[in-house]
C-alpha cells in the first residue's frame, strides 16, 4: 500500500517549495547564451525539429493505452527496444518484471432518483465486479465517516484544490481515491463514487488506482465527473433523496510478465558510473497515455539519440530506463533498484525522471546529500532552470533509498490534470514546441551530469 500511495504523492514534497522560486518562461536559456559548445549543440539539435512529437505520435496512434498485463504494454516494450536501437544506443536490453493484471470490463452508472440520468464514469483501477443500487450519502471528510454510510453508495465530494504548480493540489486530494473505497467498505457501504481529481472538467471522468486493505473490504469503486458529483451533492444537501445504480466488471488476473527496457551510451572514461534518465512506459487503459507518460518516454529516448547523433562521448554512462507498471504497482522501479543494487562494478551517480506531462520546462527538484545537491546545482546551472529541494519521481525513489541523487523534471503542469488518467490523454494535447524544449532540458541535463566532475 505504501508503494502505491507514494506513486501518487511522489511530487508533492517539492511542489509547495517552488512557489518561492521565480518562474521561468517555458524555455531554457537561449542557445546563444550557452558558452559550452557541446551543450549548445545538444540544445540546438533538440530545438531544430519535432522528432520527439513524431515519435510520441507513433507510440500513441499505433499502440495506444498500455496498462500493466495488457497486449498494449507488451507491444510498447517491443517498440521501445527498436526505438532505442534506432536511436543508436551502444547496448539495449530488457529485464523481466512480474506485474499486476487488472481488466476493466463492461461498466455503467445511472441516477434513478430524483430523475433518470446516465452518469459518465470510469471504474477505479483495481475495482471489483458488482451490481449495486442504493441511496447516495455524501462524504466530504474521510475521518468523519460513520454509520451513515452503511448500505449506501458513498459519494466522495472532495474537490481538488487549484494550486500552482497543479501537482500540489493533486497531492492533497489523491488520498481519498486510494484509501476511500476500502474505508467505506469497512463501515458497510455498498459502493463508492469519487468526484474526479481535477479542477476543470468537460464531463470527463478520471480513473486511477485504489487499494483495498483486505479481501472482505472490496466494493465497486468508480470515478464520476465533477459536474455529476456537484449536482448530486447539491440535491442531497437540499434534502432530496438520490438513488444510483452501478455496475462494474473489474477482474484481477494472476500476475503476468512484463519488462523494463534499458538502453545506454557507454561512458568513455568512467563507464561504471551511471547517469540514469527515465520515464514509465505503462499507462492507464483509457486514452493514449500521451502526457502520462508517453511524453517522458520520448524525451529520454530522444535525449540519447541527440547525443549519439552529434558524435559526443560522455565521460559517464548515460542510461535510459523505461520502467514498467508505475501506474498500479511500481513493480518496474522496485525491480530495477533490486537488480542494480550498489556494487563495485556499477555506481549510479544520479537518476532523473520525467513523469509530469509534456509541458514546457519550469524547474528541477532534487533530493540527496548536500554534496550531491551542490554537484547537481553546478551541473544544471547552464540550463537556466530553478532548482528546488524535494526529489524525483516514483520509479526512482527506490534508488534514492539506496543513496542515489534523485532529480525530477518539472514542466508546466497547469493543464496536465485536466486530462490526467482520462480518455482525453491523447497526442493532440501535447504541444510539439513545448515537448522539444522539454527534450532539450532532459538531453542537456543528462550530458551535464555525465561530464561535470
Image: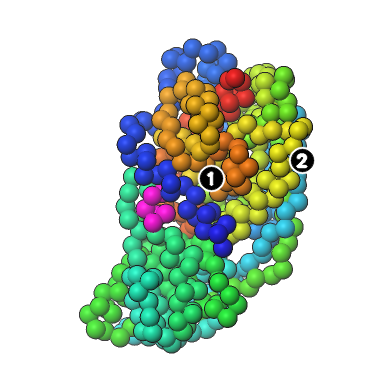
> Is residue 229 rendered to the left or right of residue 305?
left
Magenta highlight on residue 357: no
Up the image or down, 439 lies above or below 64; here it is: above
Q: CA distance from mark 2 to mark 1?
A: 23 Å
Mark sitting on residue 93: 2
Secondary structure beneath label 2: strand
Residue for point 50% across, 55% down:
8
Position of residue 242 relative to residue 264, above or below, is: below
Expressed as whole percent of the image width and height from the top left, the position of residue 412 reads 41, 40
User: Of callouts 2 and 1, which one flags the residue occurring earlier in the amino acid sequence?
Assistant: 2
Judge by depth and name the residue closer to the eye, 344 or 21. 344
Question: Residue 210, how many percent across, how many down?
Answer: 52, 66
Q: What's drawn in magenta, residue-wise?
A: 167-172
- Nearer to us in this view, 157 or 52: 157
User: Which of 302/375 is in front?
Assistant: 375
Q: Residue at x 63, y 31 (%)?
A: 349
Residue 208 visible in the snapshot: yes
Amino acid at each position: 500500500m505504501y508503494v502505491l500511495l507514494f506513486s501518487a504523492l511522489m511530487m508533492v514534497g517539492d511542489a509547495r517549495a517552488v512557489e518561492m522560486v521565480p518562474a521561468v518562461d517555458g524555455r531554457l536559456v537561449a542557445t546563444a547564451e550557452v558558452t559550452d559548445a557541446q551543450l549548445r549543440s545538444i540544445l540546438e539539435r533538440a530545438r531544430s525539429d519535432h522528432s520527439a512529437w513524431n515519435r510520441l505520435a507513433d507510440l500513441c496512434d499505433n499502440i495506444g493505452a498500455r496498462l500493466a498485463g495488457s497486449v498494449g504494454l507488451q507491444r510498447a516494450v517491443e517498440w521501445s527496444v527498436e526505438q532505442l536501437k534506432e536511436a543508436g544506443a551502444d547496448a539495449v536490453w530488457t529485464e523481466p518484471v512480474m506485474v499486476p493484471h487488472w481488466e476493466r470490463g463492461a461498466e455503467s452508472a445511472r441516477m434513478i432518483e430524483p430523475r433518470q440520468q446516465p452518469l459518465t464514469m470510469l471504474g477505479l483501477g483495481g475495482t471489483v465486479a458488482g451490481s449495486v443500487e442504493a441511496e447516495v450519502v455524501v462524504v466530504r471528510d474521510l475521518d468523519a465517516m460513520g454509520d451513515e454510510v452503511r448500505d449506501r453508495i458513498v459519494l466522495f465530494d472532495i474537490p481538488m484544490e487549484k494550486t500552482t504548480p497543479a501537482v500540489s493540489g493533486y497531492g492533497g486530494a489523491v488520498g481519498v481515491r486510494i484509501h476511500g473505497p476500502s474505508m467505506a467498505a469497512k463501515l458497510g457501504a455498498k459502493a463508492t463514487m469519487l468526484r474526479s481529481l481535477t479542477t476543470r472538467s468537460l464531463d470527463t471522468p478520471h480513473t486511477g488506482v485504489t487499494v483495498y486493505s483486505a479481501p472482505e473490504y472490496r466494493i465497486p469503486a468508480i470515478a464520476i465527473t465533477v459536474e455529476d458529483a456537484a449536482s448530486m451533492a447539491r440535491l442531497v444537501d437540499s434534502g432530496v433523496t438520490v438513488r444510483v445504480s452501478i455496475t462494474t466488471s473489474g477482474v484481477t488476473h494472476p500476475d503476468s510478465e512484463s519488462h523494463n527496457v534499458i538502453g545506454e551510451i557507454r561512458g568513455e572514461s568512467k563507464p561504471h558510473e551511471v547517469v540514469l534518465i527515465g520515464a514509465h512506459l505503462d499507462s492507464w487503459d483509457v486514452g493514449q497515455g500521451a502526457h502520462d507518460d508517453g511524453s517522458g518516454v520520448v524525451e529520454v529516448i530522444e535525449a540519447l539519440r541527440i547525443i549519439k547523433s552529434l558524435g559526443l562521448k560522455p565521460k559517464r554512462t548515460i542510461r535510459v530506463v523505461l520502467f514498467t507498471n508505475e501506474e498500479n504497482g511500481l513493480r518496474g522501479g522496485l525491480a530495477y533498484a533490486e537488480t542494480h543494487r550498489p556494487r563495485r562494478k556499477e555506481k549510479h551517480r544520479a537518476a532523473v525522471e520525467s513523469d509530469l506531462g509534456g509541458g514546457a520546462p519550469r524547474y528541477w527538484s532534487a533530493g540527496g546529500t548536500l554534496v550531491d545537491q551542490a554537484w547537481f546545482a553546478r551541473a544544471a546551472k547552464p540550463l537556466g532552470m530553478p532548482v528546488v529541494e524535494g526529489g524525483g519521481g516514483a520509479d526512482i525513489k527506490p534508488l534514492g533509498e539506496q543513496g542515489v541523487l534523485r532529480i525530477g523534471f518539472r514542466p508546466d503542469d497547469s493543464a496536465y490534470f485536466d486530462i490526467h488518467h482520462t480518455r482525453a490523454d491523447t497526442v493532440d494535447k501535447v504541444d510539439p514546441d513545448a515537448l522539444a524544449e522539454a527534450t532539450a532540458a532532459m538531453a542537456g541535463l543528462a550530458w551535464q551530469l555525465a561530464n561535470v566532475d
